[in-house]
Amino acid sequence: MRMPRKFARWALCVVLALVIGLPILALANGVPREAQQYRRDLVRNARMIWGLDAPVATFAAQIHQESGWRKNAQSAFASGLTQFTPDTAEWVGSIDPELARMGPQPGNPVWAIRALVRYDLWLWDRLAPAGVERNRMWATLRCYNGGLGHWRNEARLTADPQDRAAVDSACGRAGRSIRFCPENLGYPQRILVKLQPLYATWGRGV
């Protein structure tokens, strides 16, 4: 049985609309097209290093914030998908044998994804002895962006390191230049509140 010509034209229009619309949808929901080619590497590394309940959506949002998923992204002091500085790229091999074997390669997406996930876990683990359980990922992201030492110095000025508002308000009062505070305080806010929901289908977040 042949399909009526009018219906065939309508079906063709629907198919074309879907094919043309998919790239537009990828941009409309805020996830760059480039992200999809790195999804498998991110999920694999996150679950290998953090376990099966790894916050994959959080890491995806963090990479989105760092580079917009552009492997050749450059800033004043850092480069690559996860924006490692040369010194940190060299150091991170000391906490991961696989990264040490590969050598510092910020421009290599496979290296960069593993380095971000490993460095986040290293920071996460060091925040537990500081008494931070609530808001721990918030603190981890602040440390990734601005340094663990700065965060610790600011937390010491507060009565409770779990009081995020108190620790945040201490930014710029313990060695960190206050001019860096807007970026450092906004970093976890953008990742956890604005970007993380875009990657909900990739895995859990925090």
Image (spheres, rainbow, N blue to C red):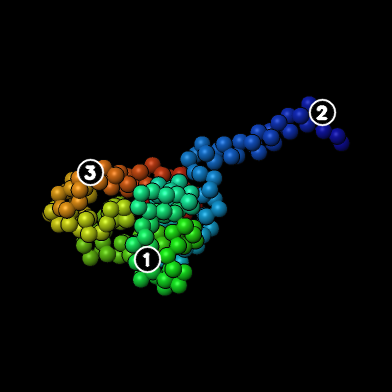
Q: Above or below — where is 98 with respect to 57?
A: below
From where the camera sits, is residue 23 visible?
yes
Which residue in the protein does label 2 denote?
A: 5
Q: Which residue position holds label 1? A: 90
Q: Residues within 10 Å of mark 3 (few under 14, many from 20)?
A: few
Q: Position of residue 204 (x, y in %)?
A: 43, 54
Q: Secondary structure at mark 3?
A: helix
Viewer-nearest residue: 115 or 156:
115
Residue drawn at (25%, 46%), measured in percent from left and top?
180
* Residue at horizontal 31 percent and vertical 52 percent from the top: 145
> Which of the two labelled residues, at mark 3 and mark 2, occupies the earlier sequence position?
2
Quarter of the image holding residue 80? bottom left
Residue lying at the far right of the rendered structure: 1
Task: Give the label, 1 or 2, closer to the camera.
Answer: 1
Q: Nearer the viewer, residue 84 or 126?
A: 84
Give the x, y percent position of residue 182.
Answer: 26, 42
> Mark 1 vs mark 3: which is more N-terminal?
1
Identify the residue under disc 3. Answer: 179
Query: Which quarter of the rendering shows the N terminus?
Result: top right
State how far apart marks 1 and 2 are (Cα): 65 Å
Q: Could you tell me if residue 121 is visible in this image?
A: no
